[in-house]
Amino acid sequence: MTRTASRAIAGVTACITITIGITLSAQRFTSHAVAVRVDVLVTDGKTPVPGLTAADFEVRDAGVVQNVKQIDIEQLPLNLVLTVDTSQSVEGTRMTALLDAARRLVGALREPDRVALLSFSTRVRLLSPLTPSRPQITAALNQLSASGATSLRDAVFSALALREDDPGRTLLLVFSDGNDTSSWLTTPKVMEAARRTDAVVYAVGIRQQAQFTGYSVTPLSREPTVVTRTQTVEEMGEFLRKVTEETGGRALFASTDADLRGTFARTLDEFRNRYVLSYTPTGVAATGWHTLNVKLKSKRGKVTARRGYFADLPPSR
């Protein structure tokens, strides 16, 4: 990563404090290889479907059927980008439950896996870049405290920027219990960033409705305004559902604070049970946006995959 986030998000550094470097304009779904990788989830109800092979899938790139191979996911290290809401509404028992869920999630990772931690309230903070060090992540988690507003879109954009140019798979797990109240970036800007990386976004929210007093910051006023309101599941999930659908992930909701631990664990388990398909694009344009359509040929199950990718390398002849 060669540019700071403040250069990538020109004009918004007054609201966001980020010390990470990003290359969203250079990061493409195809990375630096000719082959395209597609991360795919197949479920029957809420249960992942095991035992499928590449022969069970049909992948269409811009409407053209491709010759698909399967990658053994055990050979690919996992990069977990943990992005957590630390706005005022998370204060108290919810923060305690969040920390417990995050620590147990990190403890369930395998030795070569790496973790990064971002927190967001009025500002976005990178508490740890991607690291294999569990003590470093534990120390970063211990820094979390709740206050301020909710810059959800800014946080997701920043987390997507942590996707590195390596052969691993990136799981971006976003926890938030509220609607965005202080981001500078718009939803279309974040969607554009999501289309240019191969990170898979999973979102975790709280199904419980709760009334709270928080803060809202707008680019016009730049001054916090006290807001008291009741949030709904639909409101909390709207943006997160959009970004998860774009990247082939899912939005999951814990029923209560105590269920966060199980919901985080379910996210990791489901990600490990996904399939990674690979193909060399043939019969399609060398550049531009490519729609993807992935389905099962004869087996039963619901297929979830990203909607497409930007091509930046010519396909082989």
Image: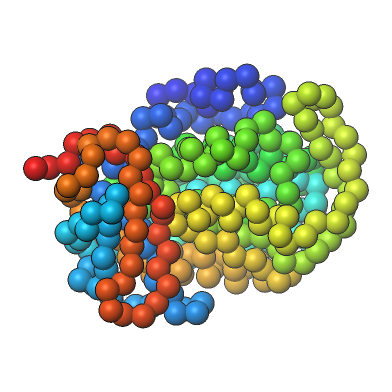
Q: Position of residue 31 (x, y in %)?
A: 29, 39
Q: Quadrant of residue 196?
A: top left
Q: Nearer the viewer, residue 214 or 74?
A: 214
> In the rendering, at what x and y percent does residue 155 appear?
60, 40
Judge from the rendering whether residue 167 lies leftward or rightward of residue 283; answer left or right: right
Quadrant assignment, res 64: bottom left
Colour scheme shown: rainbow
Up the image or down, 96 lies above or below 149; here it is: below
Residue pictured at 29% horizontal, 42% vertical: 30
Quadrant occupied by the C terminus: top left
User: Which residue sits at x=27%, y=60%?
Assistant: 59
Left or right of residue 287: residue 11: right
Viewer can see residue 138: no
Q: Quadrant of the N terminus?
A: top left
Q: How many marks?
A: 0
Q: Give whichever of 256, 111 is nearer the camera.
A: 256
- Residue 254, given in percent of the width and then of the height, sits at 67, 68
Q: Is residue 156 above or below residue 277?
A: above
Is residue 289 visible in this depiction of the protein?
yes
270 w.r.t. 163: above or below: below
Residue 12, position in %: x, y?
64, 23
Residue at image location 73% in from the left, 62% down from the top? 233
Q: Residue at x 33, y 67 (%)?
A: 295
Side of 317 relative to 181 (left or right): left
Asked if residue 220 lies left or right of residue 71, the reply is right
Can you name the residue that lies furthest to the front here? 63
